Image (cartoon, rainbow, N blue to C red):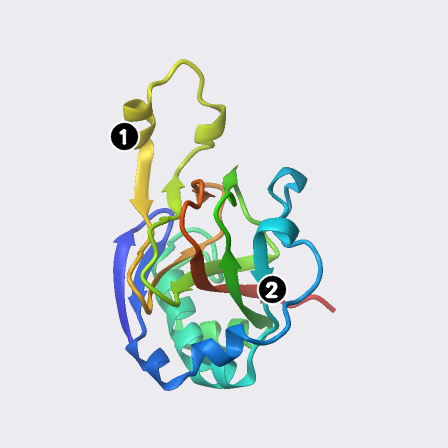
């Protein structure tokens, strides 16, 4: 796995996980999809335009340690928030990470799906996605809600985009969920196959 820092504050990294070649992705996507809506915005309901699959045990076993390493990298980049409000400390990080839980789901977004600019719930420490094929749609990131920007041209908005996610197979993007990590999924024009990740703060 390779991790590349792309933005310091908010903390965003790009990753490459060629070891996903060890997993039979087609067989995972041949399984029944998970029922229900995946979205905090009912206007962007993933129930109609997306197939969301249950977490696969082989995927979890392969990626669990790698997601911990990605979490470590992101937290070490953030000087103000998680988890120590100070210099990164490995022992403190390990104790902190033991209070989190990881979810990952294969997702197929069909043409017509999109998500407006939004912040993820802060119960999710971080979120991320990895492409399961070469995709054309890039997740966009900004430090503000560009959906509510008035009187701008597309070029003006592009100037405010701080990063665009990866599109190549087995490459992806992860980010800490902070007040600055606004992101959106532009209109999907071609089927997009990804792994969707969250590391949640422990909830009793």
Numbered circle sitting on residue 159: 1
Task: Judge by depth and name the residue closer to the eye, 136 or 185.
Answer: 136
What residue lies at 39% left-to-right and 64% top-to-bottom?
A: 130
Of callouts 2 and 1, which one flags the residue occurring earlier in the amino acid sequence? Answer: 1
Q: Secondary structure at mark 2?
A: strand
Q: Callout 1: 10 Å neighbours few (<14), some, many (20+)?
A: few
Number of numbered discs: 2
What residue lies at 30% left-to-right and 31% top-to-bottom?
A: 158
- Residue 167: x %, y % from top left: 31, 56
Q: Callout 2: 10 Å neighbours few (<14), some, many (20+)?
A: some
Q: Which residue is mark 2?
A: 201
The residue mark sitting in front, 2 or 1, is 1
- Residue 114: x %, y % from top left: 50, 43
- Residue 1: x %, y % from top left: 29, 76
Q: CA distance from mark 2 to mark 1?
A: 33 Å
What residue lies at 39% left-to-right and 68% top-to-bottom?
A: 132
Numbered circle sitting on residue 204: none
Residue 143 in the figure: left or right of residue 57:
left
What residue lies at 49% left-to-right and 52% top-to-bottom?
A: 177
Q: Is residue 87 visible?
A: no
Task: Judge by depth and name the residue closer to the eye, 17 or 2.
Answer: 17
- Residue 117: x %, y % from top left: 49, 37
In the figure, residue 141 lies in which quadrant?
top left
In the figure, residue 135 lies in which quadrant?
bottom left
């Amino acid at each position: 796995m390779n991790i590349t820092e792309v933005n310091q504050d908010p903390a965003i990294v790009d990753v490459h996980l060629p070891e996903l070649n060890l997993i039979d992705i087609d067989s995972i996507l041949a399984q029944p999809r998970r029922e229900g809506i995946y979205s905090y915005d009912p206007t962007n309901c993933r129930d109609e335009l997306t197939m969301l699959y249950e977490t696969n045990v082989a995927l979890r076993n392969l990626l669990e340690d790698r997601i911990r390493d990605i979490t470590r990298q992101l937290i070490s980049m953030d000087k103000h928030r998680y988890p120590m409000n100070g210099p990164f400390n490995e022992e403190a990080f390990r104790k902190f990470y033991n209070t989190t839980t990881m979810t990952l789901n294969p997702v197929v977004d069909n043409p017509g799906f999109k998500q407006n600019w939004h912040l993820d719930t802060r119960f999710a420490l971080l979120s991320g996605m990895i492409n399961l094929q070469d995709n054309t749609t890039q997740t966009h990131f900004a430090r503000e809600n560009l959906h509510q920007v008035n009187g701008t041209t597309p070029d003006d908005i592009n100037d405010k985009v701080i990063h665009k996610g990866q599109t190549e197979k087995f490459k992806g993007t992860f980010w800490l969920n902070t007040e600055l990590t606004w992101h959106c999924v532009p209109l999907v024009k071609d089927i997009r196959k990804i792994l969707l990740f969250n590391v949640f703060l422990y909830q009793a």
